[in-house]
Image (cartoon, coloured by chain):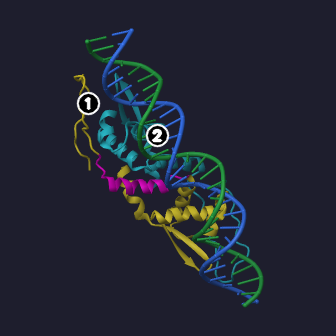
Chain colours: A cyan, B yellow, C green, D blue
DNA sequence: GAGGTATATAGATGGCCGTCGATCTGGAGC
DNA sequence: GCTCCAGATCGACGGCCATCTATATACCTC
């Protein structure tokens, strides 16, 4: 998966109609592309996107028991989505007694946001 | 864009009653969340992210024959990724003779970019 | 027309993802 | 101790995804 691999120019082509222009290389390295794509992948589900949206509305922390009834999904499924977001570094959680509170880590979205602009 | 709803702190509750009511609702409607998530999904692969990166960097139209050798993938696989990006509305293509030139549709990324900021 | 070339499509395959019900964990309160 | 509850984890299932090879399509040149 060599991003920095040299481009082999076209060897035979109809005259007068050049195929290949000067090569454009990816501006992002492979490792960076994988990081950004991983964030995009975590956001690539409407449920997770709305979860992040709710958490971002509150600068504070939101209880899981508030998140579950927002969606027509089972509690384990919502918990699974929260785990995906947590493992992507987009959210983190804190346990207080019986309840778990989730909150956004805004830094996690910066690289994707910066690449998009 | 933010809906101001307050987060009720968790208190002890009488047994037999549900833990809490949802206090925050998604600011993003389901249809909008699905649109944004679909864009994120198209970008959720490092190859496709780098393809978009190359096309954005070039700011013009890039021949497929330049894109294929950038990755250690078969030509049909690169073609598949370009098709995914095209069906997501992120890129479009134009055929010139034997060659196909791809270019970015910057509008497609705006909704995701706006949601992130 | 024949022959070659760039790209797209088809079909198969292995793996990952979203969802569920069932179960486990650990804290609260009796 | 025991019971109840919030949340996480497990195991399974169906479906979708990324990749390949093989083939088709479209186009050019002779």
A66 sits to left or right of A2? left
Our reading of the magenta stretch's main secondary structure is helix
Q: How many marks?
A: 2
Q: Mark 2 falls on what kind of element?
A: helix
Q: Point out which mark residue A84 bears.
A: 2
**x and y, in percent, of residue A108 in the image:** 44, 41
Is residue A6 a member of the stretch shown in magenta?
A: no
Who's the residue at 58% across and 73% down the image? B100
Q: Is residue B64 above or below residue D11?
A: below
Magenta segment, which residues? B26-45
**x and y, in percent, of residue B94 in the image:** 53, 75
Marks 1 and 2 sit apart, C-alpha to C-alpha, by: 26 Å
Quarter of the image that includes the C terminus of chain A: bottom left
Q: Nearer the viewer, residue B36 or A68?
A: A68
Is residue B43 a member of the stretch shown in magenta?
A: yes
Q: Residues within 10 Å of mark 1 (few under 14, many from 20)?
A: few
- On the question of residue B32 being in view, the answer is yes
Q: Point out which mark residue B18 bears.
A: 1
**x and y, in percent, of residue B82 in the image:** 55, 64
Q: Is residue B105 above or below residue A76?
A: below
Q: Nearer the viewer, residue B85 or A73?
A: A73
B60 sits to left or right of A98? right
């Amino acid at each position: 998966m060599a991003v920095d691999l040299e481009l082999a120019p076209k060897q035979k082509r109809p005259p007068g109609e050049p195929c290949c222009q000067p090569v454009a290389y990816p501006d992002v390295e492979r490792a960076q592309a994988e990081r950004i794509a991983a964030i995009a992948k975590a956001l690539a589900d409407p449920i997770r996107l709305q979860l992040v949206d709710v958490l971002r509305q509150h600068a504070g922390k939101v209880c899981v028991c508030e998140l579950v009834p927002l969606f027509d999904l089972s509690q384990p499924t919502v918990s699974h989505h929260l785990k995906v977001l947590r493992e992507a570094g987009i959210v983190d959680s804190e346990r207080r007694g019986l309840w778990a509170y989730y909150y956004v880590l805004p830094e996690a979205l910066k690289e994707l946001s910066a690449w998009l602009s």
